[in-house]
């Protein structure tokens, strides 16, 4: 708000403006005279105080727009969330797939991976936007496509309920309950779920499904709604949800740190030496600062913005800044690395003992497609 006026969409050009004079010439006049004059906005110099306010508002949006979080794999192109309440769209598939992969990182899943992610279009994807072919996921896109309060829960659902229940949500236009699904799921000619994770769906097996809290809403679909109505004890507890933005930012940051680490670890011994760190440690203080990490992101081909460090902050955590001083030291990097390896080893030992199966990842289904 500036002097009582709200700035709408800063950056949009007003080419012409109407100046409207409404004048009651004499007290007691029943009707005013109204004069309208059209002016060309560019003929008037901008008000400097207002201009600086607009610039400020615009910078904030610019930072979000320019802070890239992920590179979208070609598999999901062209990327769009248009008409997500009337059909399955590539942004729905992409978001469900990255949410699944994020839920399946060892530190999140703790050895209990999800089989698929199904999310209604009212929760995600919700921007109704078609992306350019060179446009990647930015903070702005993430905030538009999924709202922060739409937490992700893990539901345990029998194959039969998924097989017949998902297509019940596909109808009625537009329908916020329209169910989008990840790329581990395929649909047959009758619209029934045919496979999950590359395997024919097993009606008797219980699947672990990531979704939002509206998953069980009966008015959107009878089969899923009635199943959870009959089994209220299977509805996940409120406090078990994952905030989607934090979940995805952490996932993307961990992926990015893997890439940065791999680019530094020249001798590939899974440990960084002081020499190896020097490639990014421009000021030679033996650690990586926010600015040095921003440079690292740029070197990885990401669009970054110096004024917006929320992704870099998550990257610092992913890399192991345990003492929160905004710098990852060589020691922190290597300690975090060995802790992660230990966790992965532990979980794989558990799965070798038959406690849990390993997750079916998109990478396996799709071969070598790059996913960050
Ligand atoms: Ca090394
Ligand atoms: Ca440094
Ligand atoms: Ca530190």
Image: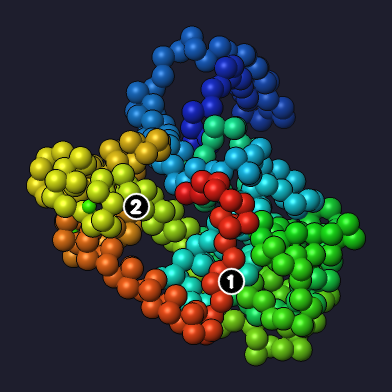
Q: Position of residue 310 (x, y in %)?
A: 35, 51
Q: Residue furthest right?
A: 190
Image: 242 above or below 311: below
Residue beneath disc 2: 257
Image: 48 above or below 138: above
Q: Depth check: 124 or 70 in front?
A: 70
Q: Residue furthest left?
A: 285
Quadrant in which residue 362 is drawn: bottom right
Q: Position of residue 73 (x, y in %)?
A: 56, 43
Does the beta carbon of the residue at mark 2 sit less than 8 Å from ligand 3?
no
Identify the mark at residue 114; answer none if there is no mark. Answer: 1
Q: Residue at x 59, y 81 (%)?
A: 236
Disc 2 or 1, which lies upstream in sequence?
A: 1
Q: Residue at x 71, y 48 (%)?
A: 89
Q: Residue at x 66, y 30 (%)?
A: 28
Q: Is residue 98 left or right of residue 261?
A: right
């Amino acid at each position: 708000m500036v002097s009582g006026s709200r700035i709408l969409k800063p950056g949009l050009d007003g080419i012409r403006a109407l100046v409207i004079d409404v004048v009651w010439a004499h007290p007691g006049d029943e009707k005013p005279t109204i004069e309208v004059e059209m002016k060309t906005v560019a003929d008037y110099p901008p008000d400097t105080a207002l201009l600086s306010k607009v610039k400020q508002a615009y910078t904030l949006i610019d930072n979000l727009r320019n802070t890239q979080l992920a590179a979208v794999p070609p598999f999901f192109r062209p990327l769009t969330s248009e008409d997500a309440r009337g059909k399955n769209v590539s942004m729905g598939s992409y978001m469900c797939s990255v949410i699944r992969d994020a839920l399946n990182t060892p530190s999140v899943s703790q050895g209990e991976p999800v089989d698929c992610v199904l999310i209604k279009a009212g929760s995600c994807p919700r921007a109704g936007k078609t992306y350019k072919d060179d446009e990647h996921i930015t903070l702005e896109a993430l905030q538009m496509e999924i709202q922060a309060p739409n937490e992700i829960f893990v539901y345990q659902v029998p194959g039969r309920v998924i097989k017949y229940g998902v297509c019940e949500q596909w109808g009625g236009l537009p329908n916020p309950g329209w169910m989008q699904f990840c790329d581990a799921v395929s649909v047959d000619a009758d619209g029934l779920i045919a496979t999950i994770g590359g395997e024919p769906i097993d009606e008797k097996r219980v699947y672990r499904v990531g979704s939002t809290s509206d998953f069980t809403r009966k008015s959107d679909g009878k089969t899923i709604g009635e199943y959870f109505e009959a089994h209220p004890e299977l509805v996940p507890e409120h406090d078990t949800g994952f905030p989607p933005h934090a979940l995805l930012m952490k996932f993307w940051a961990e992926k990015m740190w893997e890439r940065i680490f791999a680019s530094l670890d020249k001798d590939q011994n899974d440990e960084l030496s002081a020499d190896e760190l020097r490639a990014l440690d421009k000021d030679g203080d033996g650690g990586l600062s926010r600015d040095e990490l921003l440079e690292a992101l740029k070197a990885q081909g990401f669009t970054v913005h110096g004024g917006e460090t929320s992704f870099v902050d998550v990257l610092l955590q992913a890399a192991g800044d345990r003492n929160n001083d905004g710098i990852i030291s060589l020691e922190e990097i290597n300690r975090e690395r060995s802790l992660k390896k230990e966790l992965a080893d532990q979980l794989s030992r558990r799965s070798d003992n038959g406690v849990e199966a390993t997750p079916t990842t998109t990478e396996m289904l799709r071969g070598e497609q790059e996913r960050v």
